[in-house]
Amino acid sequence: MLAKRLAIIAALVLSSVAAQSPAAADSIGDIVSVFDQVCLKRFPTGNSINQFVAQNRLLPVSEEDMRAMLGTDPGVGWYTQSPPGPYTLTIELPPYHTCALRKRFPNLPDVRARFGAAVQAWVKTQRGASMKGHPTQTANVGGIDSRVDIFDVSKPGLKEPEEMIVIVTPVEGGSELRLVRAIGNR
C-alpha cells in the first residue's frame, strides 16, 4: 500500500514538473525568437529596428534607465510588458555597437543550447560565416558573478568576429538574462 502511494506521489510530482517545463521553455523560446527577429535579422539597420519598435508598440526607456544600463556609452532602448515581455531592447551605438535583450526570470535559466541553435541557424544564412562556441565562463558583470556564454561568428571580410553572448546575472528574486549581439565599430 505504501509503495503504491509513493508511486502515485512520484507520478504527480513528475507530471507537475513536466507541466511546468514547457512554460519555462516557451519563455526562453520566446525571448530567443525576439533576439532572432531583432538582433540577428534587423540589427544594425536602424530603419528596420524602428519598424519593429513601432509594430510592437515598444515604449522608450528613460534616459536615467539607459544610463543605469549602459553607463556613459551612447545608446537607445525600449521596453514592453506584452508577451513575451516584459523585456528591454537596447541598441548601444559605436564604438561598442550592440543589440541586446534583457529579461527577468524567477530562476537561473539555462539558454545556452537554444541560443546557440538560433545563432547557428542564422549563421547558415550568412555567406561564408562560421560559428565557434566557447566554454561557459563566470565573469563579474556589474559587480556580480554571472554565467557567460560566448559564440564567435566569423564572416569573410571582417577583421574580428562578431560576438553573440548570453549573460545570466543573479538578482534579487531570480536573474536577469541578457542576449547580446556585439558587432564592434564598423
Image (cartoon, helix red, strand yellow):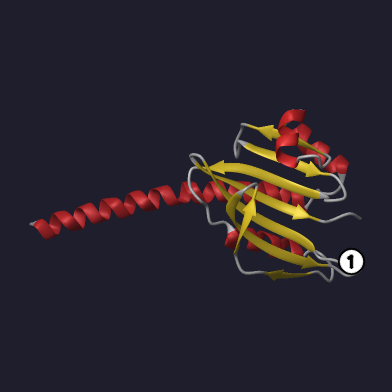
Residue 135 appears in view: yes
Q: Quadrant of the C terminus?
A: bottom right
Which residue is drawn at the image coordinates 71% and 52% (left, top)? Answer: 180
Q: Would you say 52 lies left or right of 111 here?
A: right
Which residue is drawn at the image coordinates 78% and 52% (left, top)? Answer: 41
Spot the residue most to the front.
Answer: 143
Q: Would you say 158 lies left or right of 22 here?
A: right
Q: How many marks?
A: 1
Amino acid at pointer 1: Leu
Which residue is drawn at the image coordinates 80% and 44% (left, top)? Answer: 92
Residue 142 or 4: which is nearer the viewer? Answer: 142
Residue 54 % position (x, y): 78, 32
Residue 56 appears in view: no
56 vs 32: above or below? above
Which residue is drawn at the image coordinates 78% and 64% (left, top)? Answer: 125
Residue 109 % position (x, y): 52, 52
Q: On the image, numbered disc 1 is attached to which residue?
A: 158
Q: Quadrant of the N terminus?
A: bottom left
- Identify the element where label 1 is drawn: loop
